[in-house]
Image: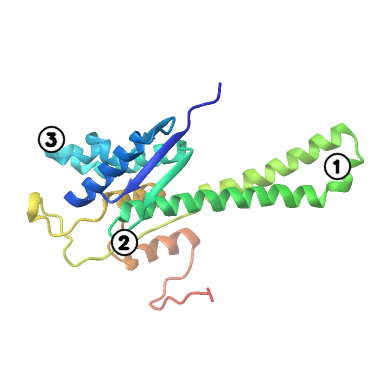
């Protein structure tokens, strides 16, 4: 028996109008009689209904949103996203989908290039050697996966309104989109968002053992 398809509907849910639009899309999807299950963040009250949330839960909302949405995005068979400029979280999700597809294409390219380079040998050799070639190809793929998994990422974001005071309700001076923040916490080497590039530079100098200078110039062209 084939597995029922899993769908993912994404878009801005931050305003009353956006919530209505996402709810309408969800209702239309259900009414269309499309088989399988579909996930829409607007239906997930455990993370998107702030009215009954404790301060502790709210302070870990970024990680919870990121984990919940990305897990469902990963398991979905298809997605329908509305990445408007106001929907930072959905734009993040579109970036994730691009990254997954790009990585998959690259890994398949590595496999294909290896097979093309060894086609004649693979076709006219012993079964033992074929197994060795397959192991070599698998190792190339593993090496690339590890390179991506252990890439050292850092992020910085400056806004003059940020502070370390306890704020609530409409008294909040500044807040970053929690989907974006959750992705930053997950993807960065130190699992944090720095206040400036100057905070990151010493980390790079320490990591790559460079001489500290006042002038930082890029070698990228």
- Mark with earlier residue (2, 3): 3
Mark 2 lies on a secondary structure that is loop
Neighbour tally class for label 2: few under 14, some 14-19, many 20 plus, Cα within 10 Å: few
- Depth check: give the residue in front, 192 or 103: 103
Contact, mark 2 vs mark 3 (Cβ under 8 Å): no
**Which label lies toward us, 2 or 1?**
2
- Depth check: give the residue in front, 58 or 216: 58
Neighbour tally class for label 1: few under 14, some 14-19, many 20 plus, Cα within 10 Å: some
Would residue 146 be visible to someone looking at this image? Answer: yes
Which circle marks residue 75 in the picture? none
Residue 164 position, x and y percent, is: 15, 55
List the single residue furthest toward the right.
124
**Residue at the image point whose x is 23% and y is 51% from the top:** 18
Q: Is residue 109 left or right of residue 72?
A: right
Residue 175 position, x and y percent, is: 20, 56
Residue that mark 1 sits on: 122
List the single residue furthest toward the top.
1
**C-alpha distance separating marks 2 and 3:** 28 Å
Mark 3 lies on a secondary structure that is helix
**C-alpha distance separating marks 1 and 3:** 62 Å
Residue that mark 3 sits on: 52
**Which quadrant does the N terminus fall into?**
top right
Q: Is residue 115 left or right of residue 161?
A: right
- Mark with earlier residue (1, 3): 3
**Residue at the image point whose x is 24% and y is 42% from the top:** 61
Mark 1 lies on a secondary structure that is helix
**C-alpha distance separating marks 2 and 1:** 50 Å
Would residue 189 be visible to someone looking at this image? Answer: no
């Amino acid at each position: 028996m084939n597995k029922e398809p899993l769908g993912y509907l994404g878009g801005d849910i931050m305003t009353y109008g956006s919530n209505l639009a996402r709810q309408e899309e969800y209702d239309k999807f259900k009414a269309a009689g499309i088989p399988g299950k579909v996930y829409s963040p607007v239906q997930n009250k455990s993370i998107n209904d702030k009215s009954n949330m404790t301060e502790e839960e709210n302070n870990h909302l970024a990680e919870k949103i990121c984990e919940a949405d990305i897990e469902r995005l990963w398991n979905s068979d298809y997605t329908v996203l509305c990445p408007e400029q106001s929907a930072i979280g959905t734009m993040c999700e579109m970036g994730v989908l691009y990254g997954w597809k790009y990585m998959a294409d690259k890994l398949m390219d590595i496999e294909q290039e290896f097979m093309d380079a060894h086609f004649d040998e693979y076709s006219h050799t012993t079964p033992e050697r074929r197994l060795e070639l397959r192991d070599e190809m698998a190792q190339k793929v593993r090496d690339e996966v590890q390179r991506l998994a252990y890439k050292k990422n850092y992020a910085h974001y400056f806004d003059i309104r940020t502070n370390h005071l306890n704020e609530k309700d409409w008294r909040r001076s500044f807040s970053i989109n929690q989907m974006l923040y959750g992705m930053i916490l997950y993807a960065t080497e130190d699992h944090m968002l720095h206040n400036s590039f100057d905070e990151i530079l010493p980390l790079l100098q320490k990591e790559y053992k460079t001489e500290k200078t006042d002038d930082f110039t890029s070698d990228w062209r």
